[in-house]
Amino acid sequence: ERIAHTNTAARISLLKEWAQLEEDAFEDPARAAELYERVLQIVPGHGDALRSLSRIYLTLGNVELAVTSLERDRDGREGLDRANRELEIGRVLLERAGRPHEAFDAVLRAQALAGDSPEVVQLLESMLPQAEIRARVAELLETIYIVQNDHAKRIHVLEVLVMTRSAKEDRVRTLERLAEVHESSGDEAKAVDALARAAREFPADLPFWERFADLATKA
């Protein structure tokens, strides 16, 4: 009765306070969700209510509704705020929904808005163990590490790419890049090893063996 006769802003404030009370004091997240849904009936794009609903639905184990709430919140945002929502969506899809391809797509959308931010890179790196998207993630991370001039991390993702390449030609090209990075970082011995692995793929290819021999004399 009290809520029904107050203005819009006050109604929303009362509903949010009530929802917080239900969740925190009475430990009834389902009831809290109902109250936040009432907020959305008044203001469909209310950011605080949508984020609270996402958190509550995750607590209740309803991942789909959690993602939907985040997507609705994202759609009302621009720039870095929108990028941050995409990253949240990506984490939920990856860690809770088991949908790595969609999680990767969310990170791509975040990258388009935020560039190679630390948050984007961190989430990408957490995706590397996912077999379904490992090659796509490693390819993207390599381009980032080239810009960052991070030889150690680039070597790691190149090794991942070598393992995921099914075509011999692709493996050889990746091993050549791996040899170049090892050489640039001053580790001729590992560069020789990478070239030797490439040469074994094409044992009759003379240029590989010539470069292998040249590097071997330096190692």
Image (cartoon, grey):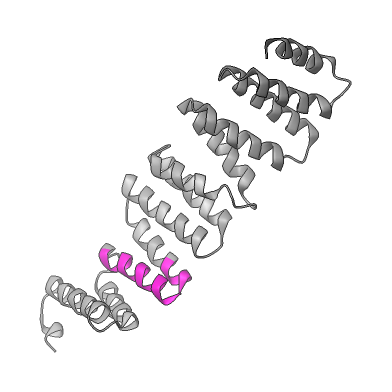
Left or right: residue 193 versus residue 58 is right
Number of marks: 0
> Residue 90: x percent and y percent?
47, 55
Query: 144 and 86: which one is in front?
Result: 144
Quadrant of residue 32 within the rendered picture: bottom left
> Residue 217: x percent and y percent?
72, 10
> Residue 55: x percent and y percent?
35, 68
Look at the image and give the residue range highlighted in magenta.
48-66
Quadrant of residue 136 within the rendered picture: top right
Quadrant of residue 170 within the rendered picture: top right
Above or below for 21 versus 45: below
Is 61 contained in the magenta span?
Answer: yes
Query: 75 and 210: which one is in front?
Result: 210
Above or below for 83 versus 194: below
Is 32 contained in the magenta span?
Answer: no
Q: Quadrant of the C terminus?
A: top right
Query: 87 and 2: which one is in front?
Result: 87
> Residue 98: x percent and y percent?
56, 63
Query: 193 and 115: which one is in front?
Result: 193
Left or right: residue 74 versus residue 36 is right
Above or below for 215 versus 102: above
Residue under the point 61% across and 49% down: 133
Secondary structure mostly seen in magenta is helix
Left or right: residue 5 versus residue 81 is left
Residue under the point 33% across and 45% down: 80
Q: Quadrant of the N terminus?
A: bottom left
Left or right: residue 37 versus residue 108 is left
Residue under the point 29% across and 72% down: 40
- Furthest toward the bottom, the residue is 1
Residue under the point 14% across and 83% down: 3
